[in-house]
């Protein structure tokens, strides 16, 4: 393997991943090659001191207000509420699924993010700073209706929290 092989690999990956991710990968590759060098399997670390080119991430184009309205209006009741909360608060999937009606303060128009449901288990949100209060904007208010006999915004058939959702593991 030659140094240009590593540089070509980096260039290819920069089209898919951020420079931070490539830096992490390169650190692993550098470590493996360094171990091979230490054990005298190879004589040169071809990944050492490779500088990453400046990476400019692609600009994100958010949905327009009209696109958001179309997506929400075309969804069924369950998914409509999920999409509305996601679009109008920016909350993560597990945080949305972990919402209980007691987390919603209609008087102060805020949602208290206290828990997350991931892989069928209740836990705290992703980071300590993720335990937070998010505002309820006017666009979200009409969707926040209490379903029958459940503490959860997204209850399972038996009324407990929803353990599985599209895109989650059991």
Image: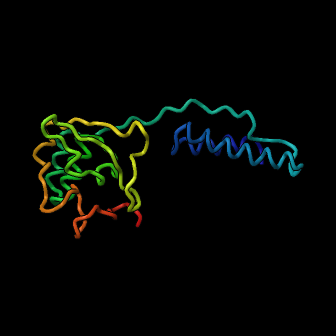
Front residue (pair 64, 146): 146
The percent position of residue 49, horizontal first and vertical second, equals 73, 33
Q: How is the image coloured?
A: rainbow
* Lateral position of residue 149 relative to residue 103, left or right: left
In the rendered image, residue 146, in percent from the top left (x then y), is placed at: 13, 54
Q: How many marks?
A: 0
Rendered residue at 15%/56% (across/down): 74
Q: Is 32 or 45 nearer to us in this picture?
A: 32
Question: Would residue 118 appear left or right of 147 to someone viewing this image?
Answer: right
Query: Quick check: 61 left or right of 71?
Result: right
Note whether 30 is above or below 153 in the view shown.
above
Q: Considering depth in this image, is 33 or 15 the residue closer to the camera?
A: 33
Q: Residue at x 87, y 52 (%)?
A: 41
Q: Position of residue 45 (x, y in %)?
A: 80, 41
Please name whichever residue, 5 or 89, is drawn nearer the observer in this view of the structure. Answer: 89
Residue 30 percent location from the top left of the image: 73, 43
Could you tell me which quadrant the C terminus lies in?
bottom left
Q: Residue furthest bottom?
A: 158
Q: Residue at x 75, y 48 (%)?
A: 32
User: Picture quarter containing residue 134?
Assistant: top left
Residue at point 41%, 64% (across, down): 169
């Amino acid at each position: 393997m030659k140094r240009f092989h590593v540089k070509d690999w980096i260039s290819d990956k920069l089209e898919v991943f951020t420079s931070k991710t490539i830096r992490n990968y390169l650190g692993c590759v550098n470590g493996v090659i360094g171990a091979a060098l230490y054990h005298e399997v190879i004589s040169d670390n071809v990944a050492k001191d490779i500088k990453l080119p400046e990476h400019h991430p692609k600009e994100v184009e958010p949905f327009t207000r009209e696109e958001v309205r179309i997506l929400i209006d075309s969804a069924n009741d369950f998914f409509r509420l999920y999409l509305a909360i996601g679009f109008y608060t920016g909350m993560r999937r597990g945080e949305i699924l972990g919402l209980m009606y007691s987390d919603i303060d209609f008087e102060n128009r805020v949602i208290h993010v206290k828990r997350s449901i991931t892989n069928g288990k209740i836990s705290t949100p992703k980071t300590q700073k993720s335990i937070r209060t998010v505002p309820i904007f006017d666009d979200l208010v009409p969707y926040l209706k209490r379903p029958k006999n459940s503490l959860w915004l997204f209850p399972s058939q038996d009324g407990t929290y929803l353990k599985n959702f599209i895109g989650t593991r059991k």
